[in-house]
Every structure is written in C-alpha cells, then in structure tokens.
Amino acid sequence: MLRHDGEAWIDILDFPFKNRTEKPRKTGLTMVIDKGLGLTDTRDLMELASNYIDHLKLTFGTSAFYNTRLLRQKIELVKSYGVHIFPGGTFLELALLQGRIFQYLDRARDLGFTGVEISDGTINIDEETRYNTIKLARTYGFELVVSEVGKKDPRDQATVPLNQQVNQDLEAGSDVVIVEGRESGEGVVIYDDDGNILGDELDAMVKNVRDPGRLLWEAPQKKQQQELIMRFGPNINLGNVQPGDVLALEALRVGLRGDTLRHYYLNTQGLEEPVHWQWPKVAAGEGGVREANS
C-alpha cells in the first residue's frame, strides 16, 4: 500500500513501483537546491516534503548573506526533520583560493552544518589538494562529505578524466559524488545546450566508475529526471531539484505520473489491453455510495 507518509491514501492504492527506498537511505537520494528560502518557507517545505528530501544545499555562496542567528535557526530546523544541510562547493573553492580552508571548516562545523561539499567547478585544484581536502573534511566529523566533478563553464577542462576523479574522491572519503549539472542543466558534462542527455558521455562515466550507485546526478529539468529514472530506475540519486518540484519528482519515481505509470504497467507488466472493471452492485447510505456487501 502507499508508504507511511501518504496517510490520506494508505490502505487504498499501491504505488506502481513498490521498492522505493525509504529514509535514511544511501540510494534514491534527492538533493534540493536552496537559493534563499526564509524560515517560513523552509518550515513549509520540510513539513510537506522532508520524507522525500535527503540533502538541502544552500547553493553557491548564499549562506554568506544570512544573519548568523537566522542561519543557525534554519540549519537546526532542517536537521530536526532528518535532512542533511550543507553549503555549496563554490564557497569552499573561495576558501581554498584564500588559504582559509581550516577556518572555513571550523565555521561550517560551528554553525551546525551536517555536511560540506568539495568541488573545483570554477577553479582548478590539483589532485593532491582535492584528495587531502576530502580527507580533512572527514576528520572534522561531518556526517556527510560530498564532492562534485565537472566544470561549470564548458570552456574549462577538468585536469583528470571525470570517472577517474570520481574514483579518487570515493577513495578519499566522499560519501556521494555529484555530477555537475548547474542550475540550468544545459551545456555541461552530460547535457547538451538544450538540456538533452548525451548518452555516450553518460554511459562512459557509469561504465568506468567503481560504484555508480554513489553518483548523484544534478538534473534540474523534468525531462532529465525522467530519462535518468527510466535508464537506471527510481532509486537513482538526483540533485539540483527545485523546492517546488520535490513531490512531482517523487511521483515520477514511484509511477504516479503518466510517463512512469505507463512504463511500469505497460512495459513491465504487459497490460496492453484496456482496463475493464466489473461494476459492482452498490448501495447508498449515510456514509456515501459503496459496494453492497462491504
């Protein structure tokens, strides 16, 4: 029957996809991109959708503009709903540029962030520095250490092949490695300028990564989310999801949207004939219309 959080419909309907992972989970992660939600909007999001959110990223360097008291309140609020929260990797890149990585990690831990992200989407970091930064973040005791591969600007070239970088990051201690998709999902890594998935790039990365289940694909567009789900199944890790799209994505995962409903029922169960339901005898009463023998 519908899972624990769908209380309004529990005992009535089954999800078309019945094996969706539940929190706390290591696969099927959803990372939400937060560009500046206030406390009220954050609370509303958590109240409505925290069962379907694993990570909340305060993207770019946006956490620099929060009042300290407000930032602490927001972090504690998100944590209280069992959701990891961390600042965007661009902020850490600035700390590396300025030689202040220890101060950055000290402050992130002091503020209460449960995780940090290590990336080189804008700047170049040599392999040793990247490896040691991931290991350093682990020693700070963060519950979640994520890294990100891929350049934000297509004119920039990664210093090592991305699949090799993923494997090195996992060896260094990353829990999850994000594949850069930017906020737009266009013209970067596995996406062309129109946001379509470049199949050869995608397949090459998956084939050469030692643990593809620990990749998290930034996929801000619905068509990208759908294609990745259809290729790899509902328990693929997806990120850069807009706050207002969380429930829509979950519906896509479990088959409660047209495309995946069709896939699960028609393609996997072979139900190609029109549905025929034998209309039962009904009786009207104080509780409404129901089967006569119920």
Image (cartoon, grey):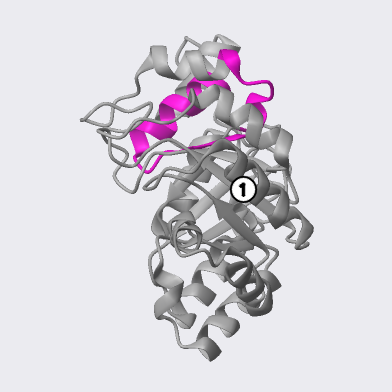
- Verify whether residue 234 appears in magenta: yes
Residue at coordinates 30% horizontally, 35% vertically from top-left? 156
Quarter occupied by residue 104: bottom right
Residue at coordinates 64% horizontally, 36% vertically from top-left? 169
Q: Position of residue 263 (x, y in %)?
A: 49, 20
Check disc 1 and report its element: helix, strand or loop.
Answer: strand
- Using the image, determine if residue 188 lies above or below residue 91: above
Residue 22 visible from this viewpoint? yes
Closest to the observer: 75 or 2? 75
Closest to the observer: 266 or 150? 150
Closest to the observer: 172 or 186? 172
Q: Position of residue 178 (x, y in %)?
A: 53, 40
Residue that mark 1 sits on: 146
The magenta segment is 207-235
Q: Quadrant of the C terminus?
A: top right
Q: Position of residue 258 (x, y in %)?
A: 41, 31
Q: How many marks?
A: 1
- Verify whether residue 147 appears in magenta: no
Say whether residue 56 is left or right of residue 243: right
Residue 285 visible from this viewpoint? no
Say whether residue 27 is left or right of residue 158: right
Residue at coordinates 59% horizontally, 30% vertically from top-left? 166
Instruction: Tell which residue pokes out farthest to the bottom in this image.
Output: 69
- Using the image, determine if residue 289 lies above or below residue 287: above
Q: Position of residue 284 (x, y in %)?
A: 57, 54
What's the residue type where badge 1 is placed?
Val
Q: Quadrant of the N terminus?
A: top right
